[in-house]
């Protein structure tokens, strides 16, 4: 439906700009918006690379194991189907830690890894398991202590 509504809005905007004599302003706004979109994408890409690198380094150290151990009571309650001390449990913990730290963009690849691991353990491949559904809900809610994505957006839009 949106693939119909947005083109209609764009066409109406162009027609209105032509009749009101604002074609130059619409051209300027198109290029300004494209420039802002590229700058924001580069900022997100840099932030994403930084935090993915930090999470990768943390996964190679004992920090993640300590944080995973701290999250175990919560993990056992939320994900009773997940095998204890498994790679899936570690990946879910890393995703939760990234979300708590506000690393939403960096949490996405970790979440995809965790979901892939849960799918491998899933006995019904065509149905989402309870753990997978809970994981989706937790990622959607995304409790954050430090909203680094918002900080990156605000920093890139600073004039």
Image: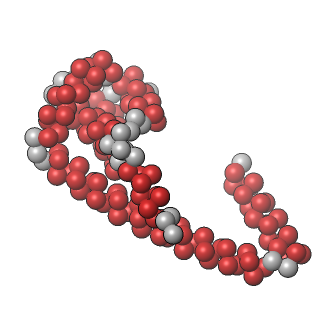
- Structure colour scheme: secondary structure
- At x 42%, y 67%, the residue is 42
Q: Residue at x 44, y 30 (%)?
A: 137
**Residue 1: x, y in percent?**
71, 48
101 or 9, which is in the foreground?
101
Residue found farthest to the left? 62
Is residue 128 at least partly visible in the picture?
A: no
In-front residue for pair 110/40: 40
Is 10 rendered above or below residue 4?
below
Q: Residue at x 89, y 75 (%)?
A: 19
Where 148 sits versus 77, above or below? Answer: below
- Where residue 123 appears, as percent x and y from the top left, is 33, 25
Residue with the most extreme bottom position: 24
Q: Is residue 17 left or right of residue 7?
A: right
Q: 46 above or below 20? A: above
Rendering quarter of residue 20: bottom right
The answer to whether residue 33 is left or right of residue 134 is: right
The image quarter in which residue 121 lies: top left
Residue 26: image location, x then y, percent: 73, 75
Answer left or right for 110 relative to 69: right
Whether residue 127 appears in this view of the structure is: yes
- Residue placed most toward the observer, 68 or 145: 145
Q: Is residue 67 above or below residue 150?
A: above
């Amino acid at each position: 439906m949106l693939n119909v509504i947005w083109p209609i809005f764009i066409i109406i905007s162009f027609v209105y700009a032509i009749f009101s004599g604002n074609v130059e302003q619409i051209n300027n706004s198109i290029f300004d918006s494209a420039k802002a979109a590229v700058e924001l994408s580069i900022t997100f890409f840099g932030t994403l690379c930084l935090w993915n690198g930090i999470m990768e380094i943390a996964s190679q150290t004992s920090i993640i194991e300590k944080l995973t151990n701290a999250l175990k009571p919560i993990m056992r309650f939320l994900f009773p189907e997940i095998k204890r001390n498994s790679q899936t449990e570690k990946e879910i913990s890393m995703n939760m830690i990234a979300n708590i730290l506000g690393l939403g963009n960096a949490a996405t690849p970790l979440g995809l890894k965790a979901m892939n691991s849960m799918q491998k353990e899933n006995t019904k491949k065509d149905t989402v398991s309870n753990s997978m559904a809970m994981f989706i809900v937790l990622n959607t809610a995304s409790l954050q202590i430090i909203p680094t994505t918002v900080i990156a957006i605000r920093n890139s839009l600073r004039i």
